[in-house]
Amino acid sequence: MMNIEDLQYAINKVSLYDDQSYFEKIYAAYYNKLFRLSLSIVKSEEIAEEVYDDVMLNIWEKRKQLNEINNFTVYLYVSVKNASLRHLSRSSKISSVNINDVIVDIEDMNPIAHERLIAREFMEKINTVIASLPPQCKLVFKLVKEDGLKYKEVAEILDISVKNVEYHMGNALKKISNSISAYNLAHHKII
């Protein structure tokens, strides 16, 4: 994503001057995270892409009002979430979202060559713990840790209190911490 200053500059260029090149930068900056959010809800890459494109088309059509939006990032997340849910309600195939199916992967951050195997095994263990988190807890963790949103933004997106976000993050981090401790004990036993 873009930093706040670059984002505000891009929003101003789009809103005041209809600058398509800056709109494309905004589109690209949010694509991966919002596509994945939609995909976790609609379960179809084609539909998730369509949802994202529809939301961004709506943003372009309402570009003159962009400067009136207080938190553009939260606005986009809520828009994509709502558009994804609307798509589900229109398609009679699925009547509810199974938040258990939200995929969260913590990426391996540039490990040294000889540590890759250990890091991969360790990350698989953590991802297994994350996958086993309760649905709301897993979604909160994804939005905070993977998407880098602030607690207040997550609370707005999910329509829950900041205290609730804090509770879910504390719960997730405790379970991950316990798993790491168990992993370390299992792999560093003194014989």
Image (tube, rainbow, N blue to C red):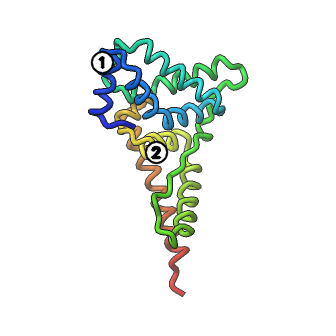
In this view, which residue lies farthest toward the right? 93
Q: Amino acid at mark 1?
A: Asn
Residue occupying the point 69% across, 26% down: 94
Per the rendering, the mark at residue 146 is 2
Nearest to N terminus: mark 2 or mark 1: 1
Quarter in which the N terminus is drawn: top left
Quarter in which the C terminus is drawn: bottom right
Query: Looking at the picture, how far across and down is residue 171, in whole percent?
Result: 45, 49
* Mark 2: few/some/many CA within 10 Å (<14, 14-19, 20+): some
Vertical arrangement, residue 123 with respect to residue 113, above or below = above
Q: Helix, strand, or loop for circle 2?
A: helix
Read off the residue under disc 1. 67
Q: Where on the picture, by quarter, is residue 4?
A: top left
Per the rendering, the mark at residue 10 is none
Query: Looking at the picture, how far across and down is residue 3, in whole percent?
Result: 32, 37
Residue occupying the point 66% across, 32% down: 44
* Mark 1: few/some/many CA within 10 Å (<14, 14-19, 20+): some
Confirm whether residue 61 shows in the render.
yes
Residue occupying the point 51% across, 74% down: 185
Q: Where on the picture, by quarter, is residue 78?
A: top left
Is residue 80 or residue 97 the one in the foreground?
A: 80
Is residue 135 or residue 21 the one in the foreground?
A: 21
Q: Where on the picture, by quarter, is residue 174?
A: bottom left
Residue occupying the point 46% across, 60% down: 110
Is residue 36 or residue 139 the one in the foreground?
A: 36
Vertical arrangement, residue 115 with respect to residue 18, above or below = below
